[in-house]
Amino acid sequence: MIDIDALHARLRADPLTHLGRKSVRLIQPYEIGYEIARARKGHSVLPDPIEWEGFQKWVETRYGWTAEQGCRQNALGFAELLSVDECSAFDLFFELREAARTTVIGWLGQTPISVENVINGTRRFVQ
């Protein structure tokens, strides 16, 4: 079954086909549209080993940054803030996502663990 990481892999491999250009600003709208199309066909929501809120928290903790500190309201905007253009922000977003996924999940096939437990230094598995 496809999950959000597989969808991201397709976006990274060929952003022009899926997004029209290599832009970090188009990732979340694409995901939302993809989910809406799946729902209209009767499919379930794509599983995501790291939900958006968990990823956001991981980025904030890693960089000592919060959405309240500036105009950027999420990890996509943060990637854009740290980059010189949308194209490099696109690459940085996926690098951040991969680093977060590796930190939170560990190795492939492992049950996902709580982002809060990783941040706090404990690795308790989510049931």
Image (tube, rainbow, N blue to C red):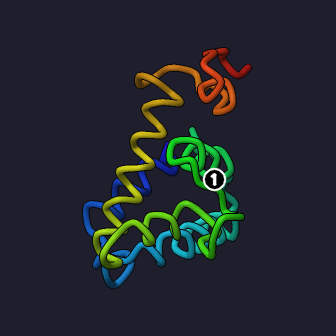
| Residue 87 percent location from the top left of the image | 29, 74
Q: Say left or right for 101 vs 111.
A: left
Give the residue number, with chain letter if any, for mark 1. Answer: 52
| Residue 74 percent location from the top left of the image | 61, 64
Q: In the rendered image of this protein, does residue 16 appear above or below residue 119?
A: below
**Front-most of 64 and 20?**
64
Q: Say left or right for 13 vs 55.
A: left
Q: Which amino acid does label 1 sit on?
A: Trp
The residue drawn where x is 51% and y is 51% is 4
Identify the residue at the far bottom of this view: 20
The residue drawn where x is 62% and y is 76% is 71
- Element on which disc 1 rests: helix
How many labels were placed on the picture? 1
The residue drawn where x is 59% and y is 74% is 33
Which image quadrant is residue 47 in? top right
**Front-most of 115 and 47?**
115
Which image quadrant is residue 12 in? bottom left
Q: Say left or right for 17 vs 46.
A: left
| Residue 108 percent location from the top left of the image | 41, 25
| Residue 11 percent location from the top left of the image | 36, 64
The residue drawn where x is 67% and y is 24% is 117
Q: In the rendered image of this protein, does residue 85 appear above or below residue 119?
A: below
Q: Residues within 10 Å of mark 1 (few under 14, many from 20)?
A: few
Q: In the rendered image of this protein, does residue 64 appear above or below residue 74?
A: above
Q: In the rendered image of this protein, does residue 50 appear above or below residue 16?
A: above
The image quadrant where one finds the C terminus is top right
